[in-house]
Amino acid sequence: MFSEFYEHLYVKVLVNIILGHKKTTVYIEILNKSGVLDSYEEEFNAKYLSTEMYEYITDQTKETPYFYISILDYSPSQGAIPTCSKHKTGYYQDLSASEYKCYKDRWTYYTAKTDVYAIEKVYEKIGVDFMFSPFVILANFFKDKIDTHLAMFILVQEGSLALSIFNHSELLYAEHLDMEMEIVSEELLIDDNDIAEIEKDMQESIDLDDIASLDDLDELDDDFGDIADLDSIDELDDFDETKDVEEELAASEDMQDFPIQDSDGLNEDYQRFSLIQGSVNTFYKDEKFESEFIENVYIGDGVGVSSDLKKYLEEEMFLNVYIRHLDLASELCALTKMELA
């Protein structure tokens, strides 16, 4: 009773933190009983709670006791599995060292306890009230499609992907993909027969007796040093064609708001494609998962991917690709409001 009375006297301040590669975004909404009074967004060139960030957040929250800090889980040791049964979780993942929670009695998302502790330590001066999984963001953002389609759904963040496959709201597979982990393509692996063949060719092409001195070796190095480095399909019958065309057009318009990506950006999109391809292969081959043939992929784009990612997925994996721009901070704030409702 008294709590409700005081809540009417003060505004609520929702602080939402999104960690990126080199920066942190802080999005703030100020609410009263009628709705949103104001909102602010600031970027900080830090991957931790810097003095500047701390002062900004405390300045925004100092006038009310009703403020809530939410953060998007950025830990590498997280994921989701297609069950809520405690008797079945071990079949998919050992959760003994993880914090985990069931989503709507359908599937479970988890994070390593050590990662949760580390995040809490980083932000202990302001405290963390809610830490949301990117898989929950994904499920909420694409709810209209997840409930009615068999498809792959991907949340693109800076440095990571949250990939899931749903069949009419039933989770079949999920994986958190870290772009900072080294990717080794099977096409680049050399087996023992290849090594033997290379050694044979080298022996035939280079006679070690002809190399008379160290000067000759230096000359050979110079020769190698001069070598330059080489570096839409038919829609489903039950699909809303007009809306999807609008989504693709909106995606292309949204991408105009992002700066043109350089070669590093293009490489990132190829890296994303490689991770997605590897994850889909795992889904098809691993007997633990109920495999279904995937034709469609919905991408929640939180960073501004280039058109190359769509091209790679369409041309190399023969997928129908639909992209929606996604504001991670606003989506995180929406989950916070749902939690407080």
Image (cartoon, rainbow, N blue to C red):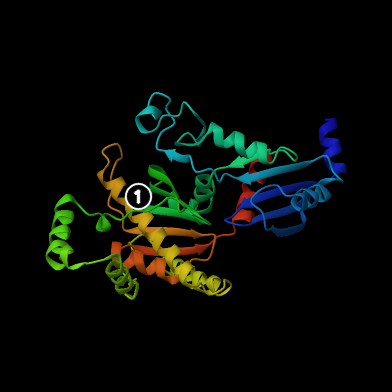
Q: Position of residue 56 (x, y in %)?
A: 79, 52
Determine which quarter of the picture holds residue 326: bottom right
Q: Position of residue 7 (x, y in %)?
A: 82, 40
Q: Secondary structure at mark 1?
A: helix
| Left or right of 49, for residue 311 | left
| Left or right of 37, for residue 273 | left
Q: Residue furthest front?
A: 213
218 or 166: nearer the viewer: 218
Against 307, residue 171 (above or below) is: above
The answer to whether residue 167 is seen in the rendering is: no
Which part of the image, by quadrant, shows the C terminus?
Answer: top right
Q: How many marks can you see?
A: 1
Q: Looking at the picture, which amino acid does disc 1 mark? A: Ser
Q: Which residue position is annotated with label 1?
A: 279
Q: Position of residue 111 (x, y in %)?
A: 51, 36
Against 86, residue 311 (above or below) is: below
The answer to whether residue 339 is seen in the rendering is: yes
Determine which quarter of the picture holds residue 73: top right
Residue at position x 16%, y 58% from top? Answer: 199
Residue at position x 31%, y 54% from top? Answer: 294
Specify few, some or many for label 1: CA neighbours under 10 Å numbering under 14, 14-19, or 20 or more: some
Residue at position x 62%, y 52% from top? Answer: 18
Q: Position of residue 84 (x, y in %)?
A: 44, 31
314 or 272: nearer the viewer: 272
91 or 58: nearer the viewer: 58
Against 35, residue 201 (above or below) is: below
| Left or right of 203, for residue 313 | right
Which part of the image, by quadrant, shows the N terminus?
Answer: top right
Against 254, residue 327 (above or below) is: above
